[in-house]
């Protein structure tokens, strides 16, 4: 990458533009502040770089919180400082070139945050993006530490258990790692068929650089087969992967599933209130080779 962000071209350009914008943001946030603040931020970055690989985005080290203290400006500065070093972090945390424009779009949004909090799951996803441990991919943010939940095998009856057992046998009885997809509120503008298609293609690009990953998983109420009758316009969320070799297993119901399923739909709220619909969480599993084959049929061969 050239030293001048203005002259960077091709795949280097998104990273160079992120770096330049992040350095400006760091300078603005640190202006007039105690120099010890930057030292604490750098200590937090060193801690996160050491401890977060292999962890989920919510699993922050306890040692981080004393560094943050009660300084409202610490967390935005932490994010900006992380993004300023993103180009140096990339060689150790492989990002396919097609993901870089998505990364730039979300990084520029993160740099505008003034009230970020470590208590907010949405910001924790952003922080994982800044660390290059999660990747914005169209409709979903993709985390690389997914594992099959222990409840998966016994939760859906004998047929489901046999299907999952066959998959486990084919993957050496390993629970992971999988690339795990998560809905992220700032990315809901891409929550549509085109955004999901782009997501799956980018997941395939990520898989191609991670030969240890077993495929893609995602758990949600919107993978429930009942949606064919309840919200048929959402059935593409499961139908497209299943047509490409994915399968789904029932995990069960929780109040959180009800909250998510009814948050934006008066129709689903009414059906739940009448006892005619119980939102249920299903896990979608798209095995590695099936996903790569699906993506290759649309984008050309993936090495």
Image (spheres, grey):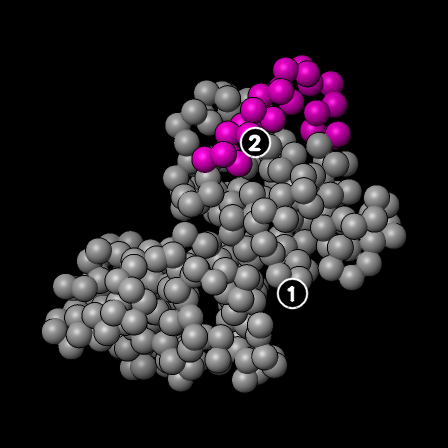
**Quadrant hosting residue 167:** bottom left
Q: Give the labeled residue for mark 1.
A: 98
Q: Is residue 168 visible?
A: yes
| Residue nearer the viewer, 284 or 70 | 284
User: How far across and down, in percent of the image, does residue 36 sit?
Assistant: 63, 15
- Tell whether position 215 is magenta: no
Farthest residue to the front: give it. Answer: 172
Q: Which residues are magenta?
A: 27-51
* Cα distance in 3D space between marks 2 and 1: 26 Å
- Judging depth in this view, the residue of 174 and 140 nearest the camera is 174
Q: Quadrant of residue 37?
A: top right
- Examine the rendered structure and indicate whether residue 43 appears above or below residue 301: above
Q: Residue placed at 67% from the left, 54% from the top?
A: 104
Residue 96 in percent (x, y) is at 62, 61
Work out which quarter of the rendered image holds the C terminus and state it.
bottom right
With 276 as the anchor, is 96 left or right in this view? right
- The vertical placement of 2 against 189, above or below, is above
* Residue placed under numbered mark 2 in the picture: 45
Kind of element beneath mark 2:
helix
**For the point 45% across and 35% down, which residue is it?**
51
On screen, residue 270 versus residue 86, left or right, reads: left
Residue at the spot x=26%, y=62% of the render?
Answer: 173
> Callout 2: few (<14), some (14-19), or many (20+) C-alpha neighbours within 10 Å?
some
| Secondary structure mainly formed by the magenta segment | helix
User: Measured from the top left, where is residue 186 in percent x and y?
Assistant: 55, 54
Alpha-carbon neighbours of circle 1 within 10 Å: few (<14), some, or many (≥20)? some
Q: Is residue 36 magenta?
A: yes
Q: Nearer the viewer, residue 23 or 215?
A: 215
């Amino acid at each position: 990458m050239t030293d001048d962000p203005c002259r960077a071209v091709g795949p280097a350009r998104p990273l160079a533009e992120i770096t330049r914008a992040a350095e400006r943001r760091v300078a603005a946030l640190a202006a007039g502040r105690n120099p010890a603040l930057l030292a604490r931020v750098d200590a937090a970055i060193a801690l996160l770089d050491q401890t977060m690989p292999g962890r989920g985005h919510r699993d922050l080290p306890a040692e981080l919180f004393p560094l943050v203290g009660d300084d409202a400006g610490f967390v935005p500065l932490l994010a900006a400082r992380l993004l300023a070093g993103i180009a140096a972090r990339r060689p150790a945390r492989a990002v396919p070139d097609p993901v870089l424009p998505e990364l730039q779009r979300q990084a520029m949004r993160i740099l505008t945050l003034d009230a970020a909090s470590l208590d907010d799951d949405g910001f924790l996803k952003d922080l994982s993006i800044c660390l290059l441990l999660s990747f914005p991919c169209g409709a979903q943010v993709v985390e690389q530490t997914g594992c099959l939940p222990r409840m998966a095998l016994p939760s859906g009856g004998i047929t489901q258990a046999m299907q999952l057992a066959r998959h486990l046998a084919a993957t050496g009885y390993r629970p992971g790692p999988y690339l795990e997809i998560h809905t992220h509120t700032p990315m809901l503008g891409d929550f549509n068929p085109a955004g999901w298609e782009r997501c799956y293609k980018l997941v395939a690009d990520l898989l191609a650089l991670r030969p240890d990953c077993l495929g893609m998983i995602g758990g949600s109420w919107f993978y429930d087969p009942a949606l064919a009758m309840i919200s048929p316009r959402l059935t593409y969320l499961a139908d497209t992967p299943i047509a490409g070799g994915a399968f789904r297993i029932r995990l069960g119901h929780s109040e959180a599933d009800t909250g998510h399923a009814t948050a934006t739909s008066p129709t689903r709220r009414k059906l739940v209130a009448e006892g005619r619909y119980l939102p249920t969480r299903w896990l979608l599993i798209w095995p590695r080779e099936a996903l790569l084959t699906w993506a290759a049929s649309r984008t050309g061969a993936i090495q």
